Amino acid sequence: MSTATATFLRSAISAKTALYGVVGSPVKHSLSPRMQTAAFAACGIDAVYLAFEVAPEGLAEALAGARALGFGGLNITVPHKEAAWRLATELDESARLSGAANTLVPIKGGWRGYNTDATGFVEAVRFELGFDPAGARVALIGAGGAARAAVAGMALAGAGKILVANRSFERADALVAELSRALGSSAIEAVLLDELPEKLEAGDLVASATPLGLYPDGRWPWELRRFSKGVKFYDMAYGERPTPLCTAAQTAGFEAAAGQRMLLCQGAQAFRLWTGHEPPVDVMQKALANG
C-alpha cells in the first residue's frame, strides 16, 4: 500500500466508510485489497476493501451477512464462483452465459452477479502473450468457475476451437455440454487430459484454470515436454512468487505468464460496476507492482 493511500485511510475512515471485499478460500494471498483500496483512495471514495476467508459451507451465510451489513460490493474467488452464481438474485449476461459469478453488486433483496473474469482473461492473454483469440485454438485445464469464465470469454472473442481438459473427464464433458448450449457454439470440445499435448501446435494457448498456482511450493503435475514448441501458457492463478506452471513452462523454453494482469483487468471492471467511476488503472497496476 502506498504512503498516500495509507494517509488517506488514516484520515478518512469513519462511520460512513463503505465496505467492499473478496470472499474465497484460500484468500490470504489476494492482492485485491491492495489494488482496490488504492483505487478508492485515488478517486477520493470513502471506502475500504478487505479479504474474507469463507469455507464453502459458509458462503450463503456470508453473502447474507454482507448484504445485511450494507457492503457496497464483493468479489468472489475460488472455490465459490459457481455457488455465488446460484445464490445471486439476478444475473448479468456474462454471468448467465458462463454459469459462474465473480463480482456481486447489491440490489434490492439480494445481489446481482457479474463475471468480469471472462473479458479479463481475454484482455490479459492479449496483453501478456500477444494471443489473439479470433479463429485461434485454446485449451483450458480445469472445470470450475474460472474455467467456465475462460471458455465463455474465448467463445465470445471468436476462438476457432476451445478444448477443455480436467482430471475428471466427466466434469469437463458436462461443462462443455452446458456451455455449448448456453453459448450456441459447437467449437467447444472436452478432451482427455493425457491427450491434450498431441492436439496443440505452435501458437496455441494452454490456460490453467485450476487452484494449483495458489500453492507456490507445489509442482506442475503434467509433462510440458510433450507440448509442441511455440505453445503459450497462461496460469489464471497468481502469487508473490512465480506459479509452478510458469516456472515449469519458462524452464522448458515456453512463453508463459500468470494471472496478475487478469486480476487487474477484472478488478477494474468490478470497480466500475460498484462505483460508476472510471477505474484508475495506472494506480491499480502500481499498487499491484509495488506491494
Image (cartoon, rainbow, N blue to C red):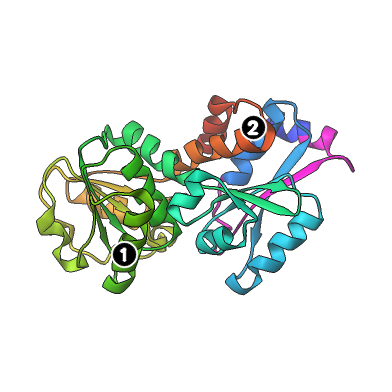
Mark in front: 2 vs 1: 2
Left or right of residue 91: residue 49? right
Q: Which residue is mark 2?
A: 39
Magenta span includes 224: no
- 4 is higher (above) or lower (below) than 262: above
Tell me where the magenta segment starts and ends, as one range. 9-31
Disc number for residue 219: 1
Q: What kind of residue is marked 1?
A: Arg
Image coords of residue 89 (percent x, y)? 65, 55
Q: What residue appears at the point 66 percent right and 27 percent down from the top-left corner?
A: 277
Tell me the quarter of the picture where residue 132 sits.
top left
Q: Residues within 10 Å of mark 1 (few under 14, many from 20)?
A: some
Give the quarter of the image for residue 1: top right
User: Can residue 2 be seen at all in this image of the molecule?
Assistant: no
N-terminal of the pair, mark 2 or mark 1, is 2
* Figure quadrant of residue 44: top right
Under mark 2, the amino acid is Ala
The vertical placement of 137 against 279, above or below, is: below
256 or 154, which is in the foreground?
154
Graded by Cα atoms within 10 Å as few (under 14), some (14 to 19) or many (20 or more), the crowding at tag 2 reads many
In the rendering, at what x and y percent does residue 130 appear? 27, 32
Residue 50 horizontal/vertical position (percent):
68, 50
Is residue 182 visible to the viewer in this orientation of the structure? yes
Gap between marks 2 and 1, in whole Å?
34 Å
What residue is at 58 percent from the left and 45 percent from the top?
32
